[in-house]
């Protein structure tokens, strides 16, 4: 096999494996067949990628019992897989947070976070203005902003009519682990841009073990 063909196949496999990782990241634990349906390939091809990723300690599985038939092998990402997704200048941000705390104390840290949130509120309100008063349209517009910022966000209407904003990745996770005020301010940001006519509740939180952060957005009078 020529070097150019080998190189092409290696690149193809790398793209395919990234696709598998992306599906597990955004959709959570799944069987190979479920991943295959979403990627439009065979389950056998997905299993081959999964076994290679397992060797790299990026995925793991558990065999879950089903009411009928054999147990289903369900695959999920490992903590090591987080390194394959961007963390925006994580080490530098953690160092800066530590320096602010040492120099200005917790009060100074809180003041800095509040100022950051104030600026974000101004920016987000401008972006959400074309969506009008519709909670659904504003939620989709917010998801678009968060996607641009690396949160792998998506938005969907729930059976009860509320909107679910899901962030499948946190690009500032290292900083948030060190300074959980960032998560507090994020919730304040969302509540501020939706105003008093909507209720915003966090339903999933990466820092307490969930695979994603998620927010339920509903009308305030519900």
Image (cartoon, rainbow, N blue to C red):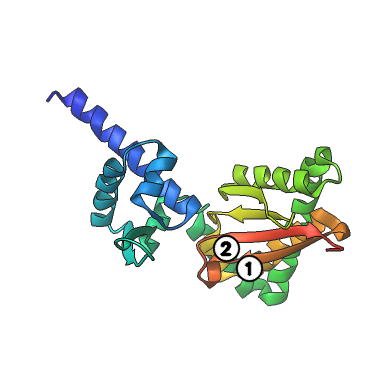
Q: Is residue 115 visible?
A: no
Q: What residue is drawn where x is 59% and y is 61%?
A: 213
32 sits to left or right of 89: left
Indicate the position of residue 171 as horizontal and vertical percent values. Answer: 54, 54
Helix, strand, or loop for circle 1? helix
Q: What residue is drawn where x is 48% and y is 60%?
A: 91
Q: Residues within 10 Å of mark 1 (few under 14, many from 20)?
A: some
Residue bearing mark 1? 100
Q: Is residue 113 above or below residue 21?
A: below
Indicate the position of residue 183 as horizontal and vertical percent values. Answer: 64, 65
Distance from the alpha carbon under mark 2 to that under mark 1? 6 Å
* In the foreground, 179 or 108: 179
Indicate the position of residue 47 as horizontal and vertical percent values. Answer: 27, 48
Badge number at residue 45: none
Residue bearing mark 2? 96
Quadrant housing the N terminus: top left
Indicate the position of residue 147 as horizontal and vertical percent values. Answer: 60, 44
172 sits to left or right of 20: right
Determine which quarter of the picture holds residue 67.
Answer: bottom left
Which residue in the rendered view is the most extreme toward the left? 1
Q: Mark 2 touching mark 1, by CB under 8 A?
A: yes
Q: Is residue 9 above or below residue 38?
A: above
Q: Residues within 10 Å of mark 2 (few under 14, many from 20)?
A: few
Helix, strand, or loop for circle 2? helix
* In the foreground, 155 or 33: 33
């Amino acid at each position: 096999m020529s070097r150019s063909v080998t190189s092409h196949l290696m690149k193809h496999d790398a793209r395919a494996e990234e696709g598998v990782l992306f599906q597990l990241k955004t959709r959570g634990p799944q069987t190979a067949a479920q991943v295959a349906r979403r990627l439009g390939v065979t389950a056998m091809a997905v299993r081959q990628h999964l076994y290679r990723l397992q060797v790299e300690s990026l995925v793991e599985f558990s065999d879950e019992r089903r009411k009928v038939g054999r147990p289903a092998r369900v695959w999920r990402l490992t903590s090591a897989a987080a390194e394959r997704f961007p963390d925006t200048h994580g080490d530098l941000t953690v160092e800066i947070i530590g320096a602010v705390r040492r120099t200005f104390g917790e009060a100074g840290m809180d003041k800095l976070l509040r100022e950051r949130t104030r600026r974000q509120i101004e920016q987000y309100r401008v972006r959400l203005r074309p969506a009008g008063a519709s909670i659904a349209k504003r939620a989709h517009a917010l998801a678009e902003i968060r996607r641009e910022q690396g949160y792998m966000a998506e938005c969907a209407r729930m059976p009860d009519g509320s909107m679910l904003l899901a962030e499948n990745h946190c690009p500032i996770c290292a900083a948030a682990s060190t300074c959980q005020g960032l998560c507090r301010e994020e919730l304040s940001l969302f509540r501020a841009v939706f105003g008093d006519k909507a209720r915003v509740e966090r339903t999933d939180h990466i820092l307490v073990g969930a695979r994603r952060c998620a927010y339920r957005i509903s009308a305030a009078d519900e």
